[in-house]
Amino acid sequence: MITEIVSLYIKDNENDLFEKAFAEAREIIASMDGYLKHELQKCVELSNKYVLLVEWNSIGDHINGFKNHKRYVDWKNLLHHFYEPFPTVEHYVKIF
């Protein structure tokens, strides 16, 4: 199992629109092969910052499965225009 961690910075005054779009987009990611669960958390200190945590069976499920799936275009169209700057995606494995 791997955890995908993404820090998201949302353009000014677009938090509500982003959260509504994510409510729709989460159904897309949850339908992917290898998806286990996700959380979207909002930063307490910076109102336009979020962190997305997604657990996958493998890194391939994320990179080769989700990112190459035809529904990834829908995900991009719903969410990518809210980001400034565009986020960096990292993958982690549990040690303990």
Image: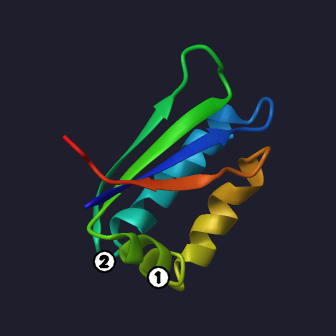
**Residue 79 placement: quadrant:** bottom right
Q: Viewed as shown, does residue 9 lie left or right of 7?
A: right
- Dot 2 amino acid type: Asp
Mark 2 vs mark 1, CA separation in Å: 10 Å
Residue topped by disc 1: 64
Q: Extreme left residue here?
A: 96
Q: Nearer the viewer, residue 69 or 92?
A: 92
- Residue positioned 64% across, 60% down in the render: 78
Q: Quadrant of the C terminus?
A: top left
Residues packed near mark 1 inside 10 Å, few (<14), some (14 to 19) or many (20 plus)? few
* Residue 14 coordinates in the image, percent (x, y): 74, 36
Q: Residue furthest top?
A: 45
- Give residue 16's position: percent from left, percent from top: 64, 34
Figure check: 63 above or below 56: below
**Picture coordinates of residue 34 (x, y %)?**
28, 72
Name the residue tied to disc 2. 33
Q: Quadrant of the N terminus?
A: bottom left
Query: Where on the picture, by quarter, is residue 59?
Result: bottom left
Q: How is the image coloured?
A: rainbow
Q: Is residue 53 left or right of residue 80?
A: left
Q: Callout 2: helix, strand or loop?
A: loop
Point 74% across, 52% down: residue: 86
Out of 2 and 53, give the one closest to the viewer.
2
Q: Which residue is located at x 54 percent, y 16 percent?
A: 44
Which residue extends farthest front? 95
Residue 96 versus residue 22: which sits nearer the camera? 96
78 in relation to 83, above or below: below
Q: Amino acid at mark 1?
A: Asn
Residue found at x 68% / y 28%: 48
Q: Residues within 10 Å of mark 2 (few under 14, many from 20)?
A: some
